[in-house]
Image (cartoon, rainbow, N blue to C red):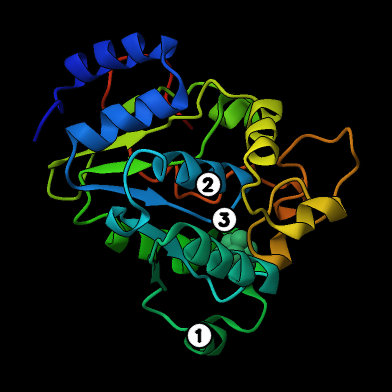
Amino acid sequence: MPLSNPEELSARSAELEAASPVEILRFALATWPGIAISSAFGVEDCAIIDLACGIVSGASLHVFSIDTDFLFPETHALKARMEERYGIRVKVWKGSVTKEEQDATHGERLYERSTDQCCAIRKIEPIGRALESVDAWVTGMRRDQGPSRAGIQILERYDHQDGSPLIKVNPLARWTHKDTWAHVMKHEVPYNPLFDQGYKSIGCWPCSKPVDADADERAGRWGGQKAECGIHTFMIRKDPSGPPSA
Ligand code: SF4
């Protein structure tokens, strides 16, 4: 696979620190044919789709999403708006355990007793399958989203289960919250209306709450018990640059 050696990748990542998100995306789209954009339809994900569709056609993009069965109706509606506006077709992955099977095995509202177990079943298991055939994985993570993301690199090397390389691409790593919203507003990118109701980070409805204007961006997630669901931390980084992303 092109550019998968951890040292070479780390050096290229350092060079891309001076590049804009669109330049990073252009490089990544040209480098790894098996590239995919993951989207939970947060404001960063919508900005990335907008940027990528300025480089290639929406129809040629591989965009995927995880449906946990606990998404807000507004998130489903936003997915439909993004598909219509950009001509993308979002591949939706669900956990192999249905919500009904989860309720029967673990009881209803598992998220009230173990968010780790619920996230493992509804998010981490399906994203593991979604990534199996992916060479490079584009995410919307930013360094200023909090301590758990402060150490992300623009290009990171992980391994699939079989040891083959998986490159994570973080085009917005250097962007701030303000940068992201400035792009979205300037280009009239669709965004989740819940952001106008006090939410700063939107995932599953049981685990996302509105917060005060001065609260940390991810403070409304999981009642402040944790900052990550696990999809960005269940694999071990192999590249030598910077601290691990979790
Ligand atoms: S975010 Fe909450 S509802 Fe969604 S999978 Fe995790 S624990 Fe379950």
User: Are the residues at dot 1 and dot 2 in contact (C-beta closer than 8 Å)?
Assistant: no
Task: Give how far across and how far down residue 51 sits, in percent.
Answer: 46, 38
Using residue 184 as the reference point, say whether residue 12 is left or right of it. left
Q: Nearer the viewer, residue 114 or 54?
A: 54
Residue at image location 20% in from the left, 44% down from the top: 135
In this rendering, the answer to whether 156 lies above or below 194 is above
Give the mark nearest the N terminus, 1 or 2: 2
Task: Give how far across and how far down residue 44 sits, in percent.
Answer: 57, 41
User: Are the residues at dot 2 and dot 3 in contact (C-beta closer than 8 Å)?
Assistant: yes
Using residue 12 as the reference point, say whether residue 223 is left or right of it. right
Q: Which mark is residue 105?
A: 1
Task: Give how far across and how far down residue 33 sits, in percent.
Answer: 17, 43
Q: Which mark is residue 41?
A: 3
Q: Foreground mark, 1 or 2?
A: 2
Inter-mark Cα distance, 1 to 2: 33 Å
Label 1: which secondary element? helix
Q: Foreground mark, 3 or 1?
A: 3
Quadrant of the rendering where the N terminus is positioned: top left
Furthest toward the left, the residue is 1
Residue at image location 33% in from the left, 51% down from the top: 57
Residue at image location 62% in from the left, 46% down from the top: 43
Question: Circle 2 is placed at which residue position?
Answer: 45
Give the mark nearest the N terminus, 3 or 1: 3
Label 3 neighbour load within 10 Å: few <14, some 14-19, many 20+: many
Label 3: which secondary element? loop
Instruction: Look at label 1 and name its amino acid.
Output: Thr
Using residue 10 as the reference point, say whether residue 84 is left or right of it. right
In this rendering, the answer to whether 126 lies above or below 214 is below
Inter-mark Cα distance, 3 to 1: 30 Å
Label 2: which secondary element? helix
User: Is residue 190 something that shows in the picture?
Assistant: yes
